[in-house]
Image (spheres, rainbow, N blue to C red):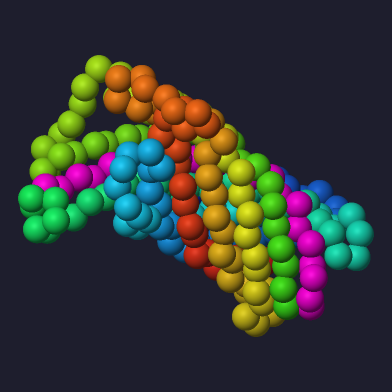
């Protein structure tokens, strides 16, 4: 939790700086992520994590706006032991600082669609097999994760909205074991479904 608190410091500095400009609106966000690693042959998403950050946006037409965020997000993969996997367990934790930039369109007074890209920087990785630390040569993930995102917002009450967002890496974040590839499948990819509350200050 101490690391998360220190990560929030630049998020709030980012928010304060952006809101000092005219015509910009912003706030804070928080919720949960459900993630998996596409290409690791484990079904998911089974790995839950935190999603925290801040956002700023600006309308350039009555219905269209651009939004930028600075977020801390936990990704990864998990397999719990049971009879189908001979009681083997697997846990992968990947923590990122991400900056999404999205186009948003208000299709209804309470509903908004979004699409865009995010650039993530990996700040921590931990992999365990049967509760033991796991590392082999070539198992490190790339430090950069470029993702495509789509999502939707629904207004709950004034200044409070819930967002459901799907995100998938555009480029592999780690090669397959042995470096094997197959057509468009070039390696392992982050895949995330998030449920986040946005509060506009």
Horizontal side of residue 97 vs 148, given as left or right: left
Q: Quarter-wise, where is residue 124 in the image?
A: top left
Horizontal side of residue 201 vs 35, given as left or right: right
- Say above or below: 177 vs 49: above
How many discs appear? 0
The residue positioned 23% from the left and 45% from the top of the image is 91
Observer-nearest of 83 and 182: 182
Is residue 116 magenta-colored? no
Is residue 90 magenta-colored? yes
Magenta stretch: helix, strand or loop mostly: strand
Magenta stretch? 88-109
Image x and y of residue 139, in percent: 29, 25
Asked if one can make out residue 134 in the rendered structure from this viewpoint, the answer is: yes
Observer-nearest of 62 and 138: 138
Asked if one can make out residue 94 in the rendered structure from this viewpoint, the answer is: no
Q: Quarter-wise, where is residue 6 in the image?
A: top left
The residue positioned 38% from the left and 48% from the top of the image is 36
The residue positioned 29% from the left and 47% from the top of the image is 42
């Amino acid at each position: 939790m101490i690391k998360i608190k220190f990560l929030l410091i630049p998020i709030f500095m980012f928010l304060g700086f952006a809101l000092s400009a005219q015509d910009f609106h912003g706030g804070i966000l928080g919720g949960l992520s459900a993630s998996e690693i596409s290409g690791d042959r484990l079904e998911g998403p089974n790995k839950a994590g935190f999603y925290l950050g801040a956002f700023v946006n600006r309308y350039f037409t009555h219905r269209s706006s651009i939004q930028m965020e600075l977020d801390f997000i936990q990704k990864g993969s998990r397999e719990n032991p049971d009879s189908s996997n001979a009681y083997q367990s697997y846990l992968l934790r990947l923590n990122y600082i991400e900056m999404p930039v999205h186009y948003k369109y208000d299709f209804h007074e309470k509903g908004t669609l979004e699409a865009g890209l995010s650039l993530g920087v990996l700040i921590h990785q931990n992999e365990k097999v049967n509760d033991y630390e796991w590392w082999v040569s070539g198992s490190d993930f790339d430090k950069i994760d470029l993702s495509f995102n789509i999502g939707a917002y629904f207004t709950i009450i004034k200044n409070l909205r819930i967002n459901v967002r799907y995100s998938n890496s555009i480029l592999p974040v780690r090669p397959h074991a042995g470096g094997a590839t197959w057509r468009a499948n070039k390696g392992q990819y982050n895949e995330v479904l998030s449920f986040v509350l946005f509060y506009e200050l």
